[in-house]
Image (cartoon, rainbow, N blue to C red):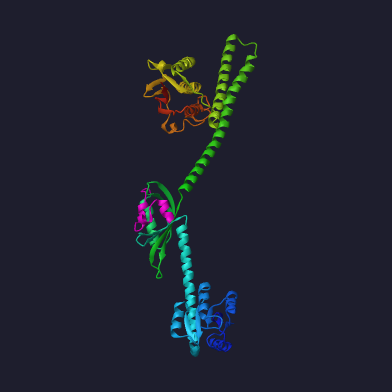
Amino acid sequence: MENKICILHLEDQLADSILVKAEIKKGFDSFDYHFADSAAAFIKALEEKKIDIVLSDYELPDYSGTDALALVKSRYSEVPFIFVSGVMGEDAAIASLLNGAVDYVFKTKLQRLVPAIKRALHEAALLREKNLAENERRKLSRAVEQSSVSIVITDRDGNIEFVNPWACETAGYSREELLGKNPRVLQSGEVPYIVYKDLWDTISAGNQWHGEFHNRKKTGELYWESVAISPVFDAGGSITHYVAIKEDVTGKKAMISELKAAKERAEASDRLKTEFISSISHEIRTPLNGILGMYQVLLDDSLSQEEKEEYFAILQSSSDRLIKTVTNYMDTALIVSGNLAVKETVFAPEKLLIEMGDQFRPAFAAAGLVMELLLPPDAGSYHVKSDAEMLRKVFSHLIGNAIEFTSRGTVSFGFEKKEGTLDFFVKDTGTGIDPEVQATIFEHFVQEDGSLTRGHEGSGLGLSITRGLLKLMGAEIRLESEKNKGSAFYFSLPVVS
């Protein structure tokens, strides 16, 4: 069944209109016919009706077919226009075709009218399809050109035939530099060959490939791309081209990496809290039990003076341990929260180290160890600008650890003058630290033997506090250790002239 067409006929003679309409009925079972005998009626019909084709006389009393043609072509360019006239000469007919009419039919040969209308409607339909396709192509082209993803089209051998502006901007190459090249120009050398083989095997078999590339821009900068590559087929099913849609995911991968790191930090924080509660419970309860126990024992009036002195010594030891534990936890909290401020002064570290030796001399004697304070002959002439109290705490933790983990031999500490710096050290001949533990020994609550029955007192905070204090002072701690031969800790501070 044919679609119902709408015909507008501009004609001043009603009789001619009747003849034309009768002729049209011979070729069309159903149609709408609108008769206009003036310019006003003609224009009104165009505005109010969806006209499929216009028929027009060449000359009218108050209007001309030429003017009607010009109006239709300017406002309704897809509507075909046919002159139907009895006075139209050959020259005028040819001129009308040049001006946009699709045909002309003389009233004396109306048998040509239906074929002319059908041909005009067919050509108009083809033109509409062509214009529609062109509009779609134009929209697609504009979308591709303005897309914020990279689009690359290659021939079947992989040579680039098209790149959109975003692909050029992402890779840093101009369109001229990429056309004719193979996409391998972007390879960084960091993607295994097997990935490219899988890609080519997949798309050459007519399938789509998805993956990621670590590519290199013209500037040498590396970037990540998420890629989808699809084959393009001709009417016979043969591959003619490949289309790659690529998105720069460098920022996205960095964000994911940061989120993973944040998750790990959060999990580490949870573990730290658990370890903190477990450690503080043990490290505070143990000396408190000793203090409370000795308090009850000392209430016994029958104790001898010798027993009282022994119990007082235990009480003093438990008190010292409790104070040390609380101080360590406070220092850790201040370091982790960022609330510990560095108070810099210029001072000679020689005096501080001599005082540290005097402070620890009884502990060395009690442990049966040799203490060595090793300083250059002109040690008193060297000064540093730092926090003296923090430096004192650093040596207190390092020397205390060395004594605790050295059963016999020597603990030495001091500094050496190097180019522009003083290199401080604490060395011992103790148990040493296994290589696999050395990477974590500066973390919170870590000792080589992490159990609460490990045979050594302490919260495991000493080295983490030491590292935290040194970072605040602008220094990094270094460790050299060999199992059963001892350990050495080093850090450097700049000399102040």
Task: Identify the magenta region.
Answer: 165-190
Disc tally is 0
Determine the residue positioned at 43% across, 33% down: 436
Name the side, left or right, on which 427 lies relative to 72: left
Name the side, left or right, on which 191 lies relative to 117: left
Picture quarter with the N terminus: bottom right
Residue 425 visible within the image: no
> In terms of depth relative to the viewer, which is nearer, 254 or 42?
42
Kindly indicate the quadrant of the structure image that contains residue 183. bottom left
Does residue 68 lie above or below 294 as drawn? below
Kindly indicate the quadrant of the structure image that contains residue 152. bottom left
Residue sitting at the far front: 62
Determine the residue positioned at 60% across, 9% down: 304
> In terms of depth relative to the viewer, which is nearer, 418 or 236?
418
Kindly indicate the quadrant of the structure image that contains residue 159. bottom left
Picture quarter with the C terminus: top left
Residue 444's x, y, as percent? 51, 31
Does 309 appear in magenta? no
Name the side, left or right, on which 377 lies relative to 103: left
Residue 94 visible within the image: yes
Residue 300's x, y, as percent? 65, 13
> In terms of depth relative to the viewer, which is nearer, 444 or 90?
90
Residue sitting at the far bottom: 108
Residue 137's x, y, as percent? 46, 66
> In terms of depth relative to the viewer, which is nearer, 244 or 70?
70
Does 183 appear in magenta? yes
Determine the residue positioned at 57% across, 10% down: 306
